[in-house]
């Protein structure tokens, strides 16, 4: 019933039955990198331009249990997004997904986070918050957080358990950053450059020729007020730079050995002295 109720609310708010004039919007994310914060902003979009609602469930490349979904299933999910509904998910930059999403008439966002903070968040999530996570049992069997963090950096492939290294995880981030029709935003920018980030998101909509009916300053205010990280069910701390509390000198050396120049390429460091 929820989609029907939300559609009726949108009809009443915008006094229209059709939402075909609104461009398709898709919010994409690197897991454990601020996806629910992005969804809150996208929900704010439904109050500044004629959109029916934000889809409740994400489109996933990897299931919650850790298995990879067939590419055609992902494409089917993307194609089936209802007209006028904002979609979101965790979709990789495969050639097929890029062809479908990265068109001049579509609006795409991709959020990512400092890999070090992402790793800390992933370990906490898999160990303490999500018992069905593919790494839960393995992490529980390790003696402490430090050992779990090492595995999250290097990855693992043994006894049927596979998780790629941090460098391999971020290959997809680098590919999305190369796409012309995707606005890539950093989680940290929502904390330190909120107005500029929201303006860039509005510009991304209007670059295709669509005019947002809400005045710009009012739209910025609405989107900013929609951000309430503590309401996310996966929210833990929400701060940037928390990795410093967990990374020892050994973790730093291991990270640099595995990830190479990843932090420099993403703009988080100027060199390997951190």
Image (spheres, rainbow, N blue to C red):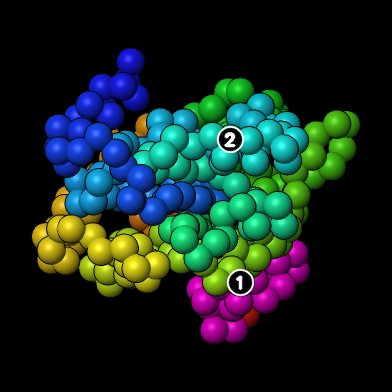
Q: Is residue 84 above or below residue 206?
A: above
Q: What residue lies at 75% left-to-right and 69% top-to-bottom?
A: 257
Q: Quadrant of residue 68?
A: top right
Of the numbered discs in the image, which one, if any, rests on residue 178? Answer: 1
Q: CA distance from mark 2 to mark 1?
A: 24 Å
Asked which secondary structure carries label 1, the reply is loop
Q: Which residue corresponds to the image point at 85% horizontal and 31% vertical from the top-left?
A: 160
Residue 180 in percent (x, y) is at 55, 71
Residue 170 in magenta stretch? no
Instruction: Give the side of residue 181 with respect to residue 71, left or right.
Output: left
Mark 2 or 1 closer to N-term?
2
Residue indicated by mark 2: 77
Q: Residues within 10 Å of mark 1 (few under 14, many from 20)?
A: few
Q: Is residue 269 magenta?
A: yes
Rendered residue at 57%/60% (across/down): 102
Residue 43: horizontal and vertical position, in percent?
Answer: 29, 43
Q: In the structure shown, which secondary structural element does the residue marked by tag 2 occupy?
A: helix
Q: Is residue 140 visible?
A: no
Total label count? 2
Q: Residue at x 20, y 33 (%)?
A: 11
């Amino acid at each position: 019933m929820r989609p029907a109720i939300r559609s009726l609310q949108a009809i009443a708010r915008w006094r229209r039955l059709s939402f075909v004039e609104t461009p398709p919007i898709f919010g994409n994310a690197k897991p454990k990198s601020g996806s629910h914060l992005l969804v809150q902003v996208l929900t704010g979009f439904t109050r500044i331009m004629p959109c029916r609602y934000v889809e409740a469930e994400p489109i996933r490349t990897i299931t919650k249990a850790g298995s990879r979904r067939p590419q055609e299933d992902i494409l089917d999910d993307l194609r089936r997004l209802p007209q006028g509904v904002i979609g979101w998910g965790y979709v990789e930059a495969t050639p097929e997904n890029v062809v479908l999403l990265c068109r001049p008439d579509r609006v795409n966002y991709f959020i990512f986070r400092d890999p070090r903070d992402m790793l800390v968040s992933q370990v906490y999530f898999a160990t303490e918050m999500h018992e069905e996570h593919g790494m839960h049992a393995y992490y529980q069997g390790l003696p402490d957080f430090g050992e779990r963090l090492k595995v999250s950096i290097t990855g693992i492939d043994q006894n049927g358990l596979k998780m790629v290294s941090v460098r391999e995880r971020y290959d997809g981030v680098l590919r999305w950053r190369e796409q012309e029709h995707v606005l890539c935003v950093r989680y940290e920018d929502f904390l330190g450059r909120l107005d500029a980030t929201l303006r860039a998101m509005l510009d991304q909509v209007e670059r295709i020729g669509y005019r947002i009916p809400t005045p710009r300053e009012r739209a910025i205010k609405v989107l900013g007020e929609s951000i309430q990280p503590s309401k996310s069910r996966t929210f833990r701390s929400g701060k940037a730079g928390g990795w410093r509390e967990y990374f020892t000198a050994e973790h730093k050396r291991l990270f640099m050995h595995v990830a190479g120049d990843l932090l420099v390429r993403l703009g988080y460091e100027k060199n390997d002295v951190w």
